[in-house]
Amino acid sequence: MLIRIRPPSAVQSSEITPESTYRNRRRFLAEMGIGAVGALALSSARAAEAPKTGGEPLKIGKQSKLAGDETVTPFETVSTYNNYYEFGTDKEDPSRNAHTLKTRPWTLSVEGECEAPAQVALDDLLKPAALEERIYRHRCVEAWSIVVPWVGIPLGETLKRFKPTSKAKYVAFETIYDKQQMPEARWSGLQLPYVEGLRIDEAMHPLAFLSVGMYGKTLPNQNGAPLRLTVPWKYGFKSIKSIVRIRFVEAMPPTTWNRLQSSEYGFYSNVNPQVQHPRWSQRSERRLGELFKRDTLMFNGYPEVASLYAGMDLKKFY
Ligand SMILES: Nc1nc2c(c(=O)[nH]1)N[C@H]1C(S)=C(S)[C@@H](COP(=O)(O)O)O[C@H]1N2
Ligand SMILES: [Mo]
């Protein structure tokens, strides 16, 4: 998002040929109008370059369309245009590299200011609650947006099971960090593990969601398998991927992009067309797959969260 630190040796001549072949083949197929299915049938080599991960069907109890009539972005786009810096800084890197992440078994540690801290296996976290599908708009600070049918569980109800105390004013989240499984991470330019945070009332808001799947199936690794945060009224970087730790805390926790450049990335990071960013317009956005820009909406079109910020100067608390 901000910087790309890559030593010259990171681009080896051995990599250049397959990379350009890959791009050319994609462009060729796109120009021929051959869709994803045709492309895969045509070229098993391409499948090896862009591994598809995740993908076990999930049982869905309840469905909510929370993006109006807006068209769902194709799975092919959402699973190949990603930010997941631990697997590379180019949009196509995570879909090619994230297969090295081992997502089973997975344990989530819930700690800090709560009466019932626990280490929970992912399956146990999911058992009591029926899985929901929620179609949300999702906007990156880089001025692109997508509409995704996520599958998961409400964040607030899940957190309540661990009985946060009155000292729990914020919730801190942490991504797995394993250099062996994430060999590209050393070039990310980020201090890792990736961390994010919400104020407790934001985390308890019914729109805040923990996703375990999308498009009816378990998450591809590049989209944050096996468990990622989804907060649709905030910029994409708040939606931390592959979460291993959740901590209830009294003080505002650090967040990865704020640590890197606090003038550009605040703690709140609510989608707000009135607060400008030095490098990307926050007034409008391009929905991936669409030609014309759309106006960016306050709170990304989720005005029901406005009461969380009553009386706050959102230009100051960006
Ligand atoms: N661990 C981790 N989580 C992350 C990121 C990252 O680099 N590492 N990128 C963030 C950013 S900038 C965005 S826009 C979203 C992208 O989510 P998506 O790939 O599912 O669309 O993931 C967020 N979560
Ligand atoms: Mo982003």
Image (tube, rainbow, N blue to C red):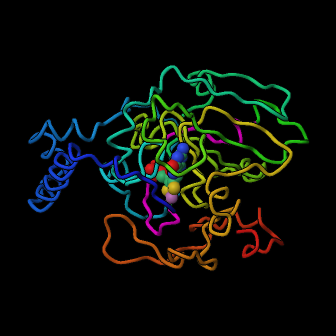
Quadrant of res 165: top right
Residue closer to the observer: 60 or 163: 163
Residue 273 locus on image (x, y percent): 59, 77
Tell me if residue 1 comes above or below residue 160 in the rendering: below
Q: Is residue 107 magenta?
A: no
Residue 247 locus on image (x, y percent): 75, 37
Residue 137 appears in the picture as rendered: no
User: Which segment is the magenta one?
Assistant: 140-159
Tell me if residue 39 comes above or below residue 67 in the rendering: above
Q: Does 196 sit left or right of 113 as displayed?
A: left
> Residue at left 67%, top 52%?
255
Q: Does 203 sit left or right of 68 as displayed?
A: right
Q: Does 84 sit left or right of 114 as displayed?
A: left
Residue 9 locus on image (x, y percent): 34, 47
Residue closer to the observer: 169 or 58: 169
Tell me if residue 177 comes above or below residue 274 in the rendering: above
